[in-house]
């Protein structure tokens, strides 16, 4: 009763929520910058909380990172679903490919996840990844059914194209500028259009 009168319990709950949100935001930025191996210390320092707070709120750093990955995959899934709702199949596929590529460039942890650099993914992350792959497959098939995407392309081609701009920043003295990834994807999209000018080699 005293807690209700003084407001201590609501104050404590509000403080707990703030710390939880700070940890989530800190984990997002740490994972984006340092990848899936972002340290517990890095996350807690960014959140300005103690390590014990992280363990009380999430149980482990891995559980917190899993939550962050699930949020990231859910956002990308929403982009894919929006692309499927676009009345123009080519515009939907193109906009998704640009957004997906940009997301991986901006987030090292996401790039590691989607490129398979992470090992033994938590089941819920692996399941969400499979769902996303299915949505991309539907984007590809829809574009092919409308005759705007070459028939020999698969969803695997599309996701592998999305990671093409990720990696080295220089080759033979040519330095990758901030906008180069857009040029790379635009060139790739021209190659994906139907009718095909050539036959793709086997995988």
Image: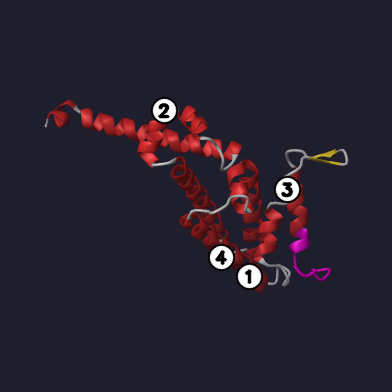
Disc 2 and disc 3 in contact, CB within 8 angstroms: no
Place of residue 150 in the rendered image (x, y in percent of width and height, measured from the top left): 73, 69
Residue 112 belongs to the span the image colors magenta: no
Q: Which residues are magenta?
A: 190-203
Residue occupying image coordinates x 56% and y 40%: 37
Place of residue 63 in the rendered image (x, y in percent of width and height, measured from the top left): 44, 45
Q: Earlier in the sequence, mark 1 or mark 3?
A: 1
Q: Quadrant of residue 57?
A: top left
The quadrant of the rendering that contains the C terminus is bottom right
Q: Earlier in the sequence, mark 2 or mark 3?
A: 2
For discs 4 and 1, the disc positioned in front in the rendered view: 4
Q: Quadrant of residue 196?
A: bottom right
* Residue sticking out furthest to the right: 172
Q: Which residue is mark 4?
A: 134
Q: Which residue is mark 3?
A: 165
**Depth order, front residue of 157/93:** 157
Q: Which mark is residue 24?
A: none
Q: Which mark is residue 49?
A: 2
Q: Residues within 10 Å of mark 1 (few under 14, many from 20)?
A: some
For discs 2 and 3, the disc positioned in front in the rendered view: 2
Chief secondary structure of the magenta span? loop
Check the image and report above or below for 2 versus 87.
above
Indicate the colouring scheme. Answer: secondary structure
Check the image and report above or below for 16 versus 120.
above
């Amino acid at each position: 009763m005293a807690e209700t009168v003084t407001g201590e319990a609501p104050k404590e709950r509000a403080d707990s929520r703030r710390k939880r949100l700070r940890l989530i935001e800190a984990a997002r930025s740490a994972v984006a910058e340092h990848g899936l191996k972002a340290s517990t210390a890095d996350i807690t320092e960014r959140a300005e909380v103690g390590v014990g707070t992280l363990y009380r709120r999430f149980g482990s750093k891995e559980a917190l990172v899993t939550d962050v990955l699930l949020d990231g995959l859910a956002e990308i899934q929403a982009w894919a679903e929006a692309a499927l709702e676009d009345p123009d199949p080519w515009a939907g596929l193109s906009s998704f490919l640009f957004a997906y590529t940009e997301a991986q460039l901006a987030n090292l942890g996401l790039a590691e996840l989607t490129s398979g650099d992470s090992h033994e993914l938590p089941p819920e992350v692996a399941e969400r990844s499979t769902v996303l792959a299915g949505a991309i497959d539907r984007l590809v098939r829809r574009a092919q059914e409308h005759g705007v995407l070459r028939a020999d392309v698969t969803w695997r081609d599309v996701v592998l194209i999305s990671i093409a701009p990720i990696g080295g920043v220089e080759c033979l003295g040519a330095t990758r500028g901030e906008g180069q990834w857009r040029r790379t994807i635009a060139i790739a999209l021209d190659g994906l259009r139907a009718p095909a000018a050539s036959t793709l080699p086997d995988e």
